[in-house]
Image (spheres, helix red, strand yellow):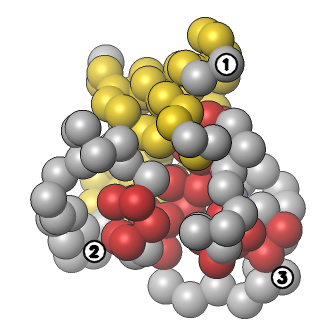
């Protein structure tokens, strides 16, 4: 999927892609998502756009898989809803979200509570519990 800079961001924050997750995708080495919710949103957008490099880079090295499975053919992401963003302390946060998708005409709902950690000024996804 390709997006123009002015297209609405897939994460649903209501801003153009270039002024939302696009900043973190493009500037990965220099410009970092400032908090766990922004990182969570940018990771959802990266799933939508197939930016596996970004997904791996924002995954904590301790839990990061060696590679990502290719997405199921025909999988369509429909939207993200961030339910809670709980900063635990300066370097730990929890984000609860629901991501909706559709595969083969069937709707799926991923409800996950994810843990994030900040190391050397960068937020990382650690792991999550689905319910
Ligand atoms: Zn976004």
Residue at (51%, 54%) from the top-left corner? 44
Which residue in the structure is indicated by mark 2?
Answer: 74
Which residue in the structure is indicated by mark 3?
Answer: 6
Q: Which SS class for mark 2?
A: loop
Report the disc number at residue 58.
none
C-alpha separation, residue under disc 2 versus residue under disc 1: 39 Å
Residues packed near mark 3 inside 10 Å, few (<14), some (14 to 19) or many (20 plus) = few
Nearest the eye: 98 or 18: 18
* Ligand 1 image position (quadrant): bottom right
Residues packed near mark 1 inside 10 Å, few (<14), some (14 to 19) or many (20 plus) = few
> Which marked residue is nearer to the observer: mark 1 or mark 3?
1
Nearest the eye: 106 or 14: 14
Query: On the rendered structure, is 130 left or right of 17?
Result: left
Q: Earlier in the sequence, mark 2 or mark 1?
A: 2
**Percent of width and height locating residue 118:** 55, 33
Which residue in the structure is indicated by mark 1?
Answer: 90
Residue 81: in sight, yes or no?
A: no
**Percent of width and height locating residue 94:** 54, 20
**Percent of width and height locating residue 78:** 52, 57
Nearest the eye: 8 or 102: 8
């Amino acid at each position: 999927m390709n997006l123009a800079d002015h297209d609405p961001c897939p994460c649903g924050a209501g801003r153009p892609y270039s002024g939302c997750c696009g900043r973190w995708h493009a500037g990965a080495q220099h410009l970092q998502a400032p908090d766990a919710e922004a990182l969570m949103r940018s990771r959802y957008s990266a799933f939508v756009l197939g930016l596996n490099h970004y997904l791996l880079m924002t995954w904590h090295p301790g839990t990061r898989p060696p590679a990502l499975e290719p997405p199921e053919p025909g999988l369509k992401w429909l939207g993200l809803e961030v339910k809670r963003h709980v900063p635990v302390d300066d370097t730990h946060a929890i984000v609860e979200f629901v991501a909706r998708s559709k595969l083969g005409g069937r709707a799926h709902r991923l409800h996950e509570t994810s843990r994030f950690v900040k190391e050397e000024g960068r937020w990382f996804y650690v792991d999550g519990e689905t319910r």
